[in-house]
Amino acid sequence: MISNKRLLHRAYICIVFIAIVLHGGQLHAAVITDDENNTISFSKPFTRIISLYPAHTENLAHLGCDQELTGIGLSDDYPLNISNKERFSYRDNIEKFLAASPDLILIRPMISRSQPELIAKLRASGIALVSLQPTSIEGMYSYWQQLGQLCGRENEAQAMIDSFKTSVSEMATRVPADMPSRPRVYFESIHAKMKTFAPDSITAFTLLTAGGINATPDAKARNNSNIAPYGKERLLAKGKLIDIFISQVGRMNRVTLEDIYAEPGFQLIKAVQNKSVFLIEEELVSRPTIRLLEGIFKIHSFLYAQTTHETVVQKQRELTHNTL
């Protein structure tokens, strides 16, 4: 016969179990594998996170993890409500990181390659490091799910994915079903080096979703990058087929319309001849965040002139608000 004391103990265990489940806790360690094939095990969500990549910062804030963000990168500028966080750089010494007492530092593979000594010291200190940077749209969905796991916002991450897919489906109703009637587009990534985007990149996805045809499907990226070298000679050889020329502009590509129109040889490009050259903010087409929806609609406005500027602005607001 079980004593009242033992019955009370069992009841207490059940209550604790239910409380853990209801509050999103985990009885067993969660495990993720990052983009450098490191396996990270954790028994509860991280609560003191330093993010060293603007996309990580933006996504965590969108998921509702503002309070868990202890520090952000020097160039992180969105959303505005995180701008007062302590700033960090992968060029800082290890003492600065240790003084902030983070339990997780989010990086990307480029940082590991450029600062292997710092990364090794941080790992040796016992701080969890996770390196993530998706290069495809499916990879982006997995990336959002991983961030949700790390900060305890799995449901929010799934809602983010579902909302993004719904908006993409809605855009599909706005573009011509007949592929040949869609404009052919050259999408420039780095003007000075004559580089475009890989055909399976996130940026190429934004172009396709917006209703354009990639004029350089033969571009090949290196080292699993979004960026693909193309070269001026190959580009000019396709000049007569390019209806629209779009270039991202930002830290990676500091270019102006004047630079593009004045580029020697570019008068052979149909889009340049017809003054159909457009610039779009790098953060709207190259970062794996929910704001890709704004980029998609803005590209759509370039491709189909009947979309007015006012409509573009209004739609961007709708797409952003619908994912909150």
Image: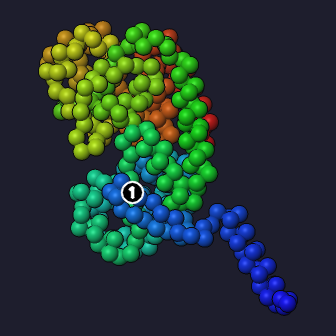
Instruction: Say left or right for 140 vs 324.
Output: left
Asked whether 252 or 25 is in front, the reply is 25
- Does residue 305 lie above or below 167 as drawn? above
Which residue is rendered at x = 57% and y = 60% of the image?
Answer: 152
Which residue is rendered at x = 25% and y = 26% of the image?
Answer: 218
Q: Residues within 10 Å of mark 1 (few under 14, many from 20)?
A: some
Q: Quadrant location of residue 288?
A: top left
- Does residue 294 lie above or below 211 as drawn? below
Residue 231 appears at what percent x and percent y? Answer: 16, 27
Residue 226 appears at what percent x and percent y? Answer: 31, 38
Residue 324 appears at what percent x and percent y? Answer: 61, 42
Residue at mark 1: 34
Residue 192 appears at what percent x and percent y? Answer: 19, 32
Residue type, mark 1 in image: Asp
Position of the N terminus, as image quadrant, is bottom right
Q: Secondary structure at mark 1?
A: loop
